[in-house]
Image (cartoon, rainbow, N blue to C red):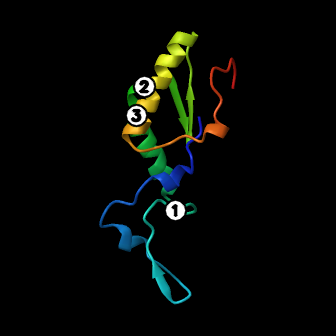
Amino acid sequence: MDLRKGYYQVRIAEGDEPKTTCVVCYKAFEWLVMPLGWTNIPAAFCTLMNKMLHPFFNQFVVIYLDDIVIYSTCMEEQLDHLRKVFQVLRENDLFVEKEKCSFAQHQV
């Protein structure tokens, strides 16, 4: 599964927006979500994903940046694992990019 607009789904902590200020054409702008291209953003995003899905590591989940691989031994187990992961994503207001997802594949 691939998260829709990966980093852009993650809000900057309330009160930290002024730390993200940049000036463009004599106007100051503050980021409200994680921007692409900043040095620590991939690490911060990985930390977030790891904390959210940690209970499922070494059971049925592998994460690489904004990609989530869910593995199972049978279809019933796959559906149960998908429900669990979708529940965690929903609770954290994260959404997948439907067009970039593949479900019930025999290999990746």
Mark 3 → mark 1, Cα distance in angstroms: 23 Å
Mark seen at residue 84: 2
Label 1 Cα crowd, 10 Å radius (few <14 / some 14-19 / many 20+): some
Kindly state the secondary structure of the residue where label 1 is placed.
loop
Residue at 44% x, 53% y: name it.
Answer: 10
Residue at the extreme right of the image, as rendered: 107
- Whether label 3 touches label 1, CB < 8 Å: no
Question: What amino acid type should be assigned to the residue bearing mark 1?
Answer: Pro
Looking at the picture, how far across and down is residue 5, in whole percent?
57, 51
Residue at 30% x, 67% y: name it.
Answer: 15
Quadrant where the image shows the N terminus = top right
Mark 3 → mark 2, Cα distance in angstroms: 6 Å
Question: What amino acid type should be assigned to the residue bearing mark 2?
Answer: Lys
Say which quarter of the image contains residue 56: top left
Q: Which of marks 2 and 1 is in front?
A: 2
Q: Mark 1 points at which residue?
A: 35
Question: In front here: 102 or 61?
Answer: 102
